[in-house]
Image: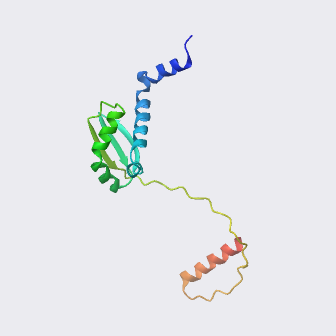
Amino acid sequence: MKKVDDILTHLKYSPEFKKLNTHTTLDKLINTLPLKLKKGVKFAYVKKEILFFVLTHPVYKMEFTHSKELIRSLLKTFSIANIEDIRFFVTNVIEKKEEAPQEKAFFDERSYGIFENKIQDKKLHQKMELIRSIIKST
């Protein structure tokens, strides 16, 4: 009867999991990069023996081009031998930032929204009415 470690090791090195192994190795490579480079990497992948780094901002592209030799030396330490070239590009997809949930106010509203709106300009008049409705809803 085989041990669980032997079975997992056998599964890990089977050809079906080659992409998964490459992905985990690239994640380790990204984590070993200096902080100024690591912050700019969105993800990395290998295609036709070329390592692609997808970056978040054009400034990082310049940093990566100057640090190509560092990346090549890291590739040697991670024994990724089939990489012939390294390329960088900036993604054109804008990331959506998660909105923080609105916090409850630290104070209670003291106004009841009872005031005269004597503003003559239509836009400003509508804005004041919007403010009045917000006050009344809280």
x and y percentages locating residue 84 in the rendered image: 26, 35
Above or below, comparing residue 112 to residue 52 in the picture:
below
Residue 130, by quadrant, is bottom right
x and y percentages locating residue 133 in the rendered image: 67, 74
Quadrant into which the N terminus falls = top right
Residue nearest the observer in this picture, 122 or 9: 9
Residue 2, by quadrant, is top right
Residue nearest the observer in this picture, 127 or 69: 69
* Furthest residue toward left: 84
Above or below, comparing residue 83 to residue 96 in the picture:
above
Q: Residue at x 39, y 44 (%)?
A: 33
Above or below, comparing residue 119 to residue 6 in the picture:
below
Coloration mode: rainbow
User: Is residue 11 toward the left or the right of residue 131 in the image?
Assistant: left
Q: Residue at x 40, y 37 (%)?
A: 26
Above or below, comparing residue 12 to residue 66 in the picture:
above
Quadrant into which the C terminus falls = bottom right
x and y percentages locating residue 89 in the rendered image: 32, 48
User: Is residue 110 toward the left or the right of residue 117 in the image?
Assistant: right
User: Is residue 111 toward the left or the right of residue 62 in the image?
Assistant: right
